[in-house]
């Protein structure tokens, strides 16, 4: 008798789980997700992380929409978007995929004008540069967020968190550095450290990054050029020789680190590990120090609504916190067998509840 009762309870439990699964599937199909991103024609189909996210959203049954920065506008009291439905060929995520000029790997629907608040999720996946146009976009998205859309990452936090300056909010994690527009102050730091890296605060992909060694005769002109003769602050950071072993990108999702980092190893004679600057990529398990840095940074990222973030670590030191359009999903997925994009979409959907 007890066995029959147990089996009956199991059947009821199993049917309930099936019902809940069906309801969740229906809910996902009704979920609208928009990707505010760069033009599809400009993407590197072999590496682009946003494409992996789009594919993950498709697989989960979400209705995917596409729009670019110029497609967002204010009309009356509404933040509107010129949307197009988007479908991509999942084959594009395969390592050996080769684009065929005679056959597009994506299809777009007709333009639809809608209030951004009609979207359940808006993924802000526009690459830097983080200029005034980008800032204006965050203001518009902040209004859409106030009207009910979930914007990932939170627009106000993207605007507030300069990727180099935000890292200095965690001085216990950072190497010796200084931020200033004053040449003599920068020179004093350089002379004290002996070998430094000068970089613009709004640089990206390794642009405007200069290593200056002791007694370098070009130090003055590099400082004058980067600061525009004292008009703009820059960062001077102690040179970290550990860069030869790689500039590690650690991805954090909802404040928690992905268990592997992508070490971007500089090419010979280069002091920058950025893949855009010719570096090579190698997946590695997180070290104890990597996890400690992630623990220092993660709670603040979560508090600020920065759901998906990439932090850069050289040796034992945090150097940048990337909040605009973090990459390296595809490389980690391929090398370690992860499925980060699925986790990102799942984390976003879970915030709707």
Image (cartoon, helix red, strand yellow):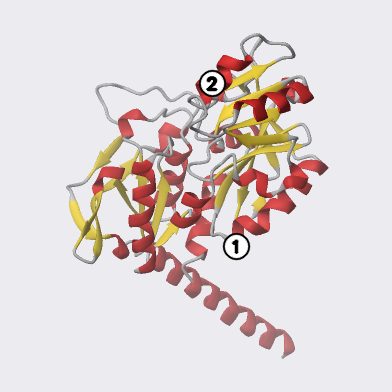
Query: Is 164 situated above or below 185?
Result: below
Residue located 75% across and 21% down the image: 191
Query: Is 85 situated above or below 24?
Result: above
Residue located 54% across and 54% down the image: 306
Residue located 34% across and 29% down the image: 42
Residue 141 x, y percent position in the rendering: 36, 56
Which dot marks residue 303?
1
Q: Nearer the viewer, residue 318 or 280?
A: 318
The residue labelled by disc 2 is 224
Residue 302 x, y percent position in the rendering: 60, 59
Mark toward the start of the polypeptide (2 vs 1)? 2
Residue 117 x, y percent position in the rendering: 31, 64
Q: Nearer the viewer, residue 192 or 93?
A: 192
Which dot marks residue 218?
none
Residue 334: quadrant of the picture: top right
Res 207 visible: no
Residue located 50% across and 35% down the image: 202
Q: Are marks 2 and 1 in contact (CB under 8 Å)?
A: no
User: Quadrant location of the N terminus?
Assistant: bottom right
Residue 90: quadrant of the picture: top left
- Quick one: SS at disc 1? helix
Residue 312 x, y percent position in the rendering: 65, 37
| Real-space CA distance between mark 2 and mark 1, rounded to the nearest whole angstrom | 38 Å
- Quick one: SS at disc 2? helix
Q: Nearer the viewer, mark 2 or mark 1?
A: 2
Res 273 visible: yes
Q: Nearer the viewer, residue 283 or 221?
A: 221
Query: Is 218 situated above or below 339?
Result: above
């Amino acid at each position: 008798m007890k066995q029959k009762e147990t089996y009956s309870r199991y059947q009821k439990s199993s049917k309930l789980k099936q019902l809940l699964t069906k309801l969740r599937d229906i809910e996902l199909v009704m979920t609208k997700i928009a990707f505010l991103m760069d033009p599809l024609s400009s993407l590197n189909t072999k590496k682009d992380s946003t494409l992996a996210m789009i594919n993950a959203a498709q697989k989960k049954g979400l209705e995917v929409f596409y729009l670019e920065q110029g497609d967002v506008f204010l009309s009356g009291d509404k933040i509107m978007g010129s949307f197009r439905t988007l479908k991509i060929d999942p084959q594009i995520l395969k390592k050996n995929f080769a684009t065929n000029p005679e056959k597009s790997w994506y299809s777009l629907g007709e333009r639809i004008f809608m209030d951004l608040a009609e979207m359940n999720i808006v993924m802000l996946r526009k690459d830097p540069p983080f200029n005034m146009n980008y800032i204006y976009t965050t203001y518009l998205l902040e209004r859409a967020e106030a009207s009910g859309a979930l914007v990932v990452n939170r627009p106000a936090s993207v605007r507030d968190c300069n990727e180099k300056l935000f890292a200095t909010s965690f001085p216990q994690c950072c190497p010796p550095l200084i931020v200033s527009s004053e040449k003599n102050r920068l020179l004093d730091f350089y002379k004290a450290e002996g070998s430094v890296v000068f970089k613009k605060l709004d640089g990206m992909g390794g642009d405007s990054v200069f290593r200056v060694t002791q007694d370098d005769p070009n130090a003055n002109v590099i400082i004058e050029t980067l600061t525009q003769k004292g008009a703009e602050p820059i960062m001077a950071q102690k040179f970290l020789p550990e860069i030869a072993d790689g500039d590690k990108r650690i991805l954090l999702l909802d404040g928690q680190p992905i268990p592997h980092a992508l070490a971007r190893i500089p090419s010979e004679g280069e002091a920058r590990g950025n893949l855009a600057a010719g570096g090579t990529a190698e997946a590695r398990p997180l070290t104890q120090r990597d996890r400690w840095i992630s623990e220092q940074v993660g709670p603040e990222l979560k508090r600020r609504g920065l759901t998906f973030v990439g932090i850069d670590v050289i040796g034992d030191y945090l150097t940048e916190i990337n909040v605009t359009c973090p990459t390296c999903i595809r490389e980690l997925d391929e090398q370690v067998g992860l499925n980060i994009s699925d986790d990102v979409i799942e984390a976003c959907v879970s915030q709707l509840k």
